[in-house]
Amino acid sequence: MGKKERVVVGLSGGVDSSVAAQRLIEQGYEVIGLFMVNWHDTVGTLSGECPWEDDRLFAELVAKRLDIPFRMVDLSEQYRQRVVDYMFAEYEKGRTPNPDVLCNREIKFDVFLKEALKLGADWVATGHYCRVEHLPDGTHRLLAGTDPNKDQSYFLCQLSQEQLSRALFPVGDMLKPEVREVAAEHHLATAKRKDSQGICFVGKVDLPVFLQQKLAAKKGRIVEIAASWEGYRTAEQEEQLVGQEDVVALSTPYAYTPQDGRKVGTHSGAHFYTIGQRHGLGVGGTALPLFVIASDVERNIVYVGQGHTHPGLLRSALHIRPEEMHWVREDRRMQVGDEPQRFMVRIRYRQPLQSARLYVTDEGGYILFDEPQRGITAGQFAAWYDGDELIGSGVIDK
């Protein structure tokens, strides 16, 4: 008998990572459970408590039940520097970051991976609903999870070949109800535990309260822009630009001034709002619900429009800066001047994949969608797929 390969599982105290550990044991690996403490602060958390203490208890109960070693590591300093400070900086610029994508790239598959290697790990495993295929030629394919309702490949869109080379996703070929069943069959404490929500490792937060740790509240105007605003392109003008493949014009957001609309309320800080946001505006009395269509953090103005089909919410293209273009598959990297390639793209988690073309120029990447997209948001990630394989991603610049 050869020596068993050692896998360190990121036991989070949730059902998915618990079943990931159980499956690895079944597959003949030597398994160690490693729990990460990434956040101690309770400012802005809706429970008012540190959620990690409960999580650790559940993770420890699972490790005992599976009879595997249990370790704990405090990565809160790295998490603050690499994820939370980045979050604050992005919101301050009026952008909306995705901390979960950053957490996977910077913490789970970097700092945590290094901790796992110290424990002699051959592999690192998590409970993500996605799959990885390790090809004989040394290429590692990141594939969507089998469960269409739970696919989490988007959250891993910034991983590199090196990071994927050590990764295992044991529940990626399972459906969520099956995971719950397996947990119940093996009497795991997490079998009926609710899925965690909110910011990775921080939990559910009141975002303005959380952000006010660093970003001061400051009263400003909410200005409504009518759907009939003369600055919007007509359908014919849009069609013409699409036909000309004018990705620069199509990816440029509309620019508003307070004179373009009417004041309908006040807010406590433009950087607390995101494109497409409906709740938390505190403005009533309109025929249709109001949605945020733009924010100007310099002048501290939030622009809104009525109805979820307001033209200010729709755009046919987006831009990614050259330095933000990331290729999970380096061998699929497009070069400047290459013919545009067709991909299926998503611009937020759980959004159905959208058909689009990717252009790579000296100015970076441009994604031109077949259908206009609602709520393209700077700071979020666009991820592009070929079939069920995630090929690359980038931070949306505009």
Image: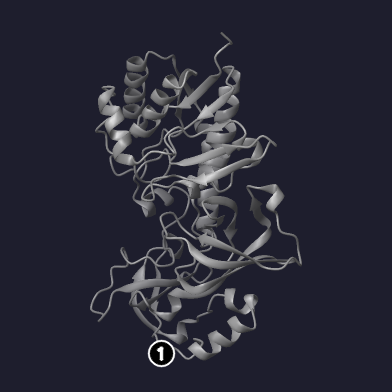
Q: Residue at x 32, y 16 (%)?
A: 65
Task: Judge left or right: residue 374 versus residue 341.
Answer: left
Secondary structure at badge 1 equals loop
- Relative to 75, residue 355 above or below: below
Residue 195 seen in the current view? no
Q: Residue at x 60, y 19 (%)?
A: 118
Figure quadrant of the N terminus: top right
* Residue 78 placement (x, y as % from top left): 56, 34
Closer to the camera in the image, 364 or 200:
364
How crowded pointer 1 is (Cα within 10 Å; few <14, some 14-19, many 20+) is rated as few
Q: Farthest top residue?
A: 1
Q: Quadrant of residue 175?
A: top left
Q: Quadrant of residue 305?
A: bottom left
Task: Judge left or right: residue 226 versus residue 5.
Answer: left
Tag 1: residue type?
Ser
* Residue 82 placement (x, y as % from top left): 57, 41
Closer to the camera in the image, 123 or 298:
123
Q: Quadrant of residue 289?
A: bottom left
Q: Which residue is mark 1?
A: 228
Figure quadrant of the C terminus: bottom right
Instruction: Tell how many labels.
Output: 1
- Relative to 148, residue 37 above or below: above
Task: Judge left or right: residue 384 versus residue 338.
Answer: left
Closer to the camera in the image, 235 or 390:
390
- Relative to 237, residue 300 above or below: above
Closer to the camera in the image, 134 or 105:
134
* Residue 91 placement (x, y as % from top left): 50, 57
Q: Residue at x 26, y 80 (%)?
A: 286
Residue 285 seen in the current view? yes
